[in-house]
Image (spheres, rainbow, N blue to C red):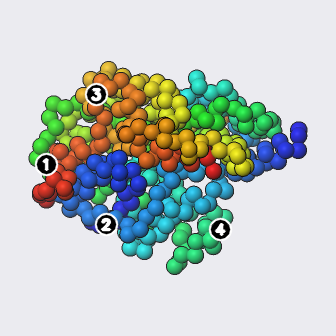
């Protein structure tokens, strides 16, 4: 494993608070995920790939921007693994370094319509930018 | 009964109806909602990363402010409720986080999760009681078929939220019965509307919101109620448009015959 990838894996495990070894590979998290179809790497794979230290691919994954934080996987995992926390921790590894932001303030006006609640803009900034 | 109240940013702007109807109804029901003197946006999403401390602090300030007043903290927006309740749980259960946050914030006395966080629906159920609400209804919603949309934030993760059964909740249906309408249960009532992802992938929210609305319509609903401004936006803007989505407090204010304060009279029950 590349030294960077090892460091990133350690950070992801630490910031997520997830114990990947608790996973019994049942796939229930992915089965219950309402956005399964939009994801290139599914929640159960996040768990396995972090366990294997294979996080570079996760950091390029479209799933980072498609996880809804709906907590269906968290609620329904029979082992209490909390896959959504892992997805968030990987996303943090991507957006925390300088230049890593997904959503820039300049891009926001074009996305607005008159009914958009402030809650949506704040949420998107918290999820997509640091 | 008196509560400290955290409205949150959206209830001061786009979702003013949610807030105004709640205040008018509470007044009629004899509940005092004392808005926190100073509050900041809760951040709208709970920071899942354990090392995110700064993004938890506005919630902690609100919790500590309620603690200073010796009152439970009342919330209304599903997202605010979710964030504040979970951060409160962190402060109670995570000693490391508690130490770091308290060292940094330097409050009058350390905050350790003492405040009780109560959602407006929980207040209706546990403080007032749905039976009492039934007695106070002067404009029963007879003949209406109303579907409750719970979404994600109120229910999950159930271990922390402790709001209702996460897979088969009933609090909103009981509320609908209390105002005299027929509650419509449908399979998608606790599925996601697409949340914040709609800002960059509206198609995701379209697909999900349509499923939710179709599911409610198939079971005969004429209206959907929600407690969340983002759910309301997604369902109304990205759903099928077949039935309206309104805030549950608007239904309550209607049933109690109270208009928002700006509209004038609030008569006590
Ligand atoms: S549901 Fe839990 S135990 Fe099953 S694969 Fe997903 S993370 Fe692993
Ligand atoms: S939190 Fe994310 S990964 Fe988990 S079920 Fe929801 S969308 Fe899927």
Q: Secondary structure at mark 2?
A: strand
Q: Which residue is mark 1?
A: B257
Q: Dot 3 falls on which chain?
A: B
Q: Dot 4 falls on which chain?
A: B
Note whether B221 is above or below B49 in the view shown. above
Disc 1: CA contacts within 10 A as few (<14), some (14-19) or many (>=20): many
Taking the spot 53% from the left edge, 30% from the top edge, the residue there is B201
Q: Are marks 2 and 4 in contact (CB under 8 Å)?
A: no
Q: Which residue is mark 4?
A: B100
* Residue B60 pos. (x, y %): 51, 64
Taking the spot 72% from the left edge, 50% from the top edge, the residue there is A98
Q: Are marks 3 and 4 in contact (CB under 8 Å)?
A: no
Q: Quadrant of residue B149?
A: top left
Say whether residue B2 is left or right of residue A22. left
Q: Dot 1 falls on which chain?
A: B
Identify the mark nearer the N-term, 1 or 2. 2
Q: Which residue is mark 2?
A: B34
């Amino acid at each position: 494993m590349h030294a960077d990838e090892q460091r990133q894996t350690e950070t992801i495990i630490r910031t997520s608070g997830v114990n990947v070894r608790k996973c019994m590979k049942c796939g229930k998290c992915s089965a219950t995920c309402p956005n399964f179809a939009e994801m290139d790497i599914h929640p159960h794979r996040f768990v396995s790939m972090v366990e294997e230290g294979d996080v570079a691919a996760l950091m390029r994954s479209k799933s980072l921007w498609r996880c809804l934080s709906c907590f269906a996987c968290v609620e329904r995992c029979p082992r209490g693994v909390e896959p959504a926390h892992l997805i968030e921790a990987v996303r943090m590894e991507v957006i925390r370094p300088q230049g890593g932001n997904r959503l820039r303030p300049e891009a926001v006006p074009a996305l607005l319509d008159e009914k958009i609640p402030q809650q949506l803009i704040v949420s998107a900034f918290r999820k997509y930018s640091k | 009964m008196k509560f400290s109240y955290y409205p949150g940013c959206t209830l001061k702007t786009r979702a003013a109806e949610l807030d105004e109807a709640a205040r008018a109804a509470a007044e009629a029901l004899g509940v005092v909602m004392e808005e926190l003197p100073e509050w900041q946006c809760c951040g709208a999403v709970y920071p899942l990363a354990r090392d995110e401390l700064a993004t938890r602090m506005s919630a902690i300030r609100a919790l500590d402010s309620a603690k200073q007043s010796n009152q439970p903290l009342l919330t209304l927006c599903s997202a605010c409720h979710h964030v504040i309740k979970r951060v409160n749980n962190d402060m109670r259960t995570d000693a490391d986080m508690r130490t770091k946050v308290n060292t940094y914030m330097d409050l009058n006395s350390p905050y350790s999760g003492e405040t009780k966080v109560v959602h407006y629906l929980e207040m209706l159920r546990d403080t007032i009681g749905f039976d009492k609400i039934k007695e106070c209804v002067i404009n029963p919603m007879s003949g209406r078929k109303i579907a409750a949309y719970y979404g994600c934030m109120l229910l999950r993760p159930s271990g922390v939220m402790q709001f209702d059964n996460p897979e088969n909740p009933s609090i909103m249906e009981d509320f609908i019965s209390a105002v005299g309408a027929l509650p419509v249960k449908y399979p998608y009532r606790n599925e996601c509307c697409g949340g914040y992802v709609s800002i960059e992938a509206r198609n995701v929210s379209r697909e999900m919101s349509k499923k939710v609305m179709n599911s409610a319509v198939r079971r005969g609903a004429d209206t959907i109620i929600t407690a969340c401004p983002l759910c309301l936006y997604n369902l109304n803007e990205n759903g099928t448009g077949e039935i309206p989505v309104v805030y549950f407090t608007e239904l309550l204010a209607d049933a109690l015959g109270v208009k928002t304060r700006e509209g004038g009279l609030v008569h006590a029950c």
